Image (cartoon, rainbow, N blue to C red):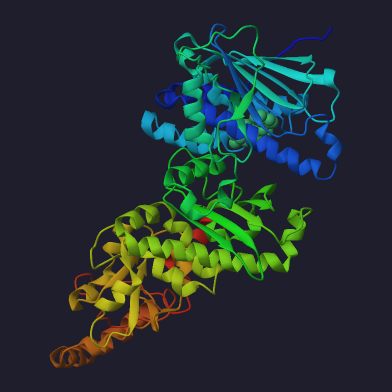
Amino acid sequence: ETQKETHSFQTEVKQLLNLMVHSLYSNKEIFLRELISNASDASDKFRFKALKDDSLYENQPDLKVTITFNKEAKTLTIADTGIGMDKDDVISHLGTIAKSGTAEFLSNMTGDEKKDSQLIGQFGVGFYSAFIVADEVTVVTRKPGQPVDEATQWISKGDGEFTLETVSKEHRGTSITLHLKDDEVEFADAHRLRGLVRKYSDHISIPVEMIKEATPEFDDEGNIKEVEGEQPVEFEAVNSATALWTKSRSEVTDEEYQEFYKHISHDYQDALTWSHNKVEGKLEYTSLLYIPAMAPFDMYNRDQNKGLKLYVQRVFIMDEAEQFLPMYLRFIKGVIDSNDLSLNVSREILQSDKTIDSMRSALTKRVVDMIAKMAKKDETKYLEFYKQFGQVLKEGPAEDNTNKEKILNLLRFSSTHTDSEVQDQALKAYVERMKEGQDKIYYITAENFITGKNSPHLEVFRKKGIEVLILSDRVDEWMMGYVHEFDGKSFQNVAKGQLDLTKFETEEEKKEQESTDKNFESLLKQVKEILKEEVEDVRLTYRLTDSPACLVLSENDMGAQMRKIMEAAGQ
Ligand code: ADP
Ligand code: MG
């Protein structure tokens, strides 16, 4: 006889469960997608593990998901023959240890139901979505290789506690039974379930099976024949059960691409766009890469989930393979399926493999081109994208010298041309607007847009009608350390060093300045003497038109913003 243990959900899991059940209610059917998605992940992991030890298959060669239901009992069961869980796995995955970032995630909640439900989707609550429609969930699971009578049963009403018990389970894998709430019995219905499987899980690469629909037999007069005795239960796949990326582009609909995106990204919204390619030749691989619509709440956390799902010859190898894309493209989600790598490939091997280097540069180029294509095709959509990911793209010029010019083309800035905080001006457009004789791209960095916009350094430029880019993102000043020119024009910080704007001056202005210079010669000398401990130099300036004086950094000085960052870091 085994002991029943009662455990409490971790506080954060409790909060999450509560939030989710309420805010996802309007989209409750997604629970099925989440559970099938987990079953598919578990099967992928099993297949990989069994590569090294095929005794793990035990007496069950099939990898599949089986869905059964009982309307009277109000139950719905999703069973898989995947990797299963032992007791410790169950404890940590289903309740006591919150996923990393849960606290951060919860602190991002706004109270606005619509926004929050989008965030929840991003967070990938997965398993817990069962409680949207169920008032009790039972999980019975066994890892392959574990004795049949050492399976684990987990039961919870989603109210803060779960119980654990050791039970027996013949087949490896996991079976999840939902006891449906009274008003959710619609889900214990063959027609409804088949529809949902086709809608959400068609791309799953293993069969998702349900009981075969009985096709009635007719007699000679066209009446349905009465069938005598028990009929054997037969199952059939409801989905198409082919890995989506192995199909050709023309065989896949946009809806299917979007559902597959949701499966691999745990995102709950559609992707913005994607690129699906089969590469043949020296290297052979298929890539399917997506741009999400929204930045994950933890994009600036360097430990956030990044990288692609790696398959080798359709066998799943690992999640979050980071080696295939640079950091500044860490928001890209997708799948790589290689024919060249060995099935034994590990993270360590990936780090030093020559094949990976060439795949990485090809994939990087592909993503940069996909973004450029979007920018060209639909500027409004592009600006939406840029709002989400522009800051990360700005890491590109420093990280990726090869694609620098292309990346610069993708950047958008605030500028005195619009005087708007919206970053929507491309460098190319700036260059096209440059004044006769202008050979530099002028910019200013500031702590925020308002400060930048009102900077006294801009006065003379405004007066002369010369456009200046206003850079106020945290990463800007650092980025500009790596950006020296665009389209053959060099960049000039208007707050640094001597500005030579003489060529934009009229003869009259020049004469006027010469006489002013003379008049102020002695005053300048005196001021210099007084401030000699304070500043490097005192110059008469034509930078200003309204403000009496300003501080200028010498060409090699750290920028003002950078200086603040260093100060904040205690240096
Ligand atoms: P995610 O799928 O994003 O990891 P879920 O909440 O959907 O989050 O699942 C949590 C974890 O529970 C999974 O990562 C996995 O370790 C485990 N799990 C869930 N369902 C299964 C299953 N059918 N078989 C094996 N493990 C599972
Ligand atoms: Mg999941």
Nearest to the observer: residue 456 or residue 340: 340
Give the residue at x 76% y 53%.
343
User: Where residue 314 sits: x, y (%)?
Assistant: 67, 50
User: Where residue 412 sits: x, y (%)?
Assistant: 36, 64
Nearest to the observer: residue 433 or residue 259: 259
Residue 97 visible within the image:
no
**Residue 335, placed above or below residue 75:** below
User: Where residue 358 sits: x, y (%)?
Assistant: 64, 69
Residue 90 visible within the image:
yes
Relative to residue 382, is residue 81 drawn left or right?
A: right
Total numbered labels placed on residues in the image: 0
User: Where residue 530 sits: x, y (%)?
Assistant: 36, 78
Relative to residue 353, is residue 369 drawn left or right?
A: left
Give the residue at x 64% y 29%.
65
Relative to residue 329, is residue 90 drawn left or right?
A: right
Q: Quadrant of residue 214?
A: top right
Give the residue at x 73% y 54%.
347
